[in-house]
Amino acid sequence: MWHKRSTCVAVNATLLAFLFLSVSFNKEYLRPAFASTPALSAFTGSYANFIAAYVICLFPACPILIKKFNSTKGMRIVLATATVVFVILTIEELAPVFGASKVRDGYDIVASAFGSSCAILTFLFLTRVISRKKNKTELQEAAARSEK
């Protein structure tokens, strides 16, 4: 039990570190470098919302995958998390509460929606990969038992 919990803490701590490092790198280096290009400026300006939605929505994925919830229950948890994260980021964009956003920007709302959607797709991908490995392992074990 301790091993599973520490694995989840380590994965989520890594995700959180990635979130802060990538947002800081974007703010300090990428945004100033691409400020003169309108399309890239919009992308780098909305990156923080995208990556925040993506990473925060993935926080429950590790415990779900490790505890081997059924896929329907796990998907409901991830969908609920994605919805809550999107709503909070949208409210923060429209009426800043924490002071992170100083400018109302539609691109940020779209980036939040895209980040939440990408997290859902990532979770679906991970569950499919894990279930395929599980099925392959079960087939190999059944074949080994039948040979004996």
Image: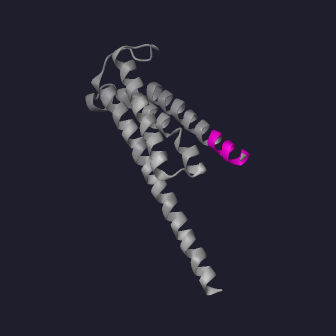
- Left or right of 68 in this view: 23: left
Task: Give the main secondary structure, helix, strand or loop, of the magenta stretch.
Answer: helix
Q: Quadrant of residue 110?
A: top left
Residue furthest to the right:
2
Quarter the C terminus occupies = bottom right
Residue at image position (48%, 46%) is: 73
Residue 20 included in the magenta stretch of the image: no
Total labels: the figure holds 0
* Vertical position of residue 75 compared to residue 127: above or below: above
Residue 33 shows in the view: no
Taking depth in this image into account, of 26 and 49 the one nearest to the observer is 49
x and y, in percent, of residue 141 in the image: 60, 75
Residue 4 included in the magenta stretch of the image: yes
x and y, in percent, of residue 40 in the image: 31, 32
Residue at image position (57%, 69%) is: 137
Taking depth in this image into account, of 38 and 138 the one nearest to the observer is 138
Residue at image position (43%, 51%) is: 124
Residue 113 shows in the view: yes
Taking depth in this image into account, of 65 and 114 the one nearest to the observer is 65
* Vertical position of residue 52 compared to residue 130: above or below: above
x and y, in percent, of residue 54 in the image: 44, 37
* Vertical position of residue 48 compared to residue 95: above or below: below
Residue furthest to the bottom:
147
Residue at image position (36%, 14%) is: 95
Q: How does the figure colour the protein chain or chains?
A: one colour
- Which stretch is magenta? 2-9
x and y, in percent, of residue 99 in the image: 45, 13
